[in-house]
Image (cartoon, grey):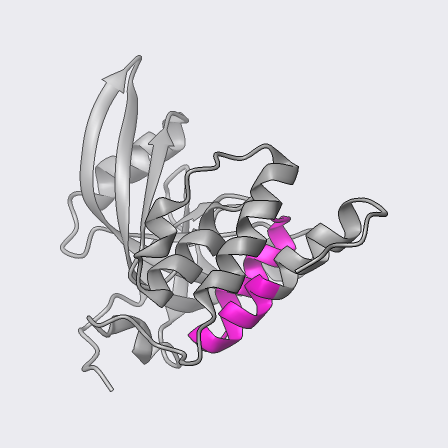
Amino acid sequence: MPRRPELPGDIALFPLSGAVLLPRTRLPLQIFEPRYLQMVEDVLKTRDRLIGMIQPVESGPDRLAQIGCAGRIVAFSEVGDGRLMISLRAQSRFRLRALEPRATPYLHAHVDWSGFEADLATRPECAGQFDRDALIARLIRYARRHGLASDWSAAETSDEETLVNSLSMLLPFPPGDKQALLESPTLADRRELLDGLLEYALRGGDDEEIVQ
């Protein structure tokens, strides 16, 4: 198990529906709201430069999901009109413990990193027994049905974790499904769920029988 670096107990939160960050991935974000521009400015002054990505929910404590993922700002640039483009590199998932009252326009939270030690590994996780061709075939059918870009050549050479995690982040699943993918304990669990979501979307899209 990788040795966990000293991570802060409190982090800034960026609630964003439909956006999840998964281990060993990067997430580009365009920042334009004044409160989040302030958040980026403040976070860049800290040692860890961490932002906690978390999804809003309709019910529950603080109306936020209980599990999110923190990313370190590894790149940022101005893109005009006061907007910023930033890139977050995933650090670790976390459990939300409590919101922290701060005199800032954005949220801070006390978080617990325990249980997600594997997120810190430098090598990609491997689930084994991976039928890449079947997943890509299902992905191509899904992309055609939803009018998505059809060049999936990178999927043919990506390692299993990069492929599964990237698809989990990029495909237009409902927020609840995105959260379930984030909370999947292992890559094998996430791969199985992703495959099931693709198959469900294909079978539920119309009355035609989907042929493998």
Relative height, residue 189 to residue 147 (above, below): below
x then y, percent, for residue 208 = 82, 48
Can residue 109 be seen here? The reply is: no
Q: Is the stretch drawn in magenta largely helix, strand or loop? A: helix
Whether residue 102 is visible, yes or no, is yes
Which sits in the foreground, 146 or 179? 146
Between 132 and 162, which is closer to the camera in this rendering? 132
Q: Quadrant of the N terminus?
A: bottom left
Query: Within the image, what quadrant is residue 132 found in?
Result: bottom left
Residue 186 colored magenta?
yes
The quadrant holding residue 84 is top left
Farthest front residue in view: 211
Expressed as whole percent of the image width and height from the top left, the position of residue 53 reads 42, 52
Q: Farthest residue toward the right?
A: 207
Residue 133 horizontal/vertical position (percent): 47, 62
Looking at the image, the residue that sits furthest to the top is 81
- Which residue of the protein is positioned furthest toward the bottom in this rendering? 1
Q: Is residue 125 magenta?
A: no
Q: Is residue 65 above or below residue 170?
A: below
Region of the chain picked out in magenta, as a range:
173-195
Give residue 38's quadrant in the image: top left
At x 31% / y 78%, what residue is drawn? 118
Residue at 19% across / 73% down in the picture? 6
Q: Nearer the viewer, residue 209 or 175?
A: 209
Judge left or right: residue 27 versus residue 43: right
Q: How many marks?
A: 0
Classify the position of the C terminus by image quarter: bottom right
As rendered, which of 55 and 63 lies closer to the eye?
55
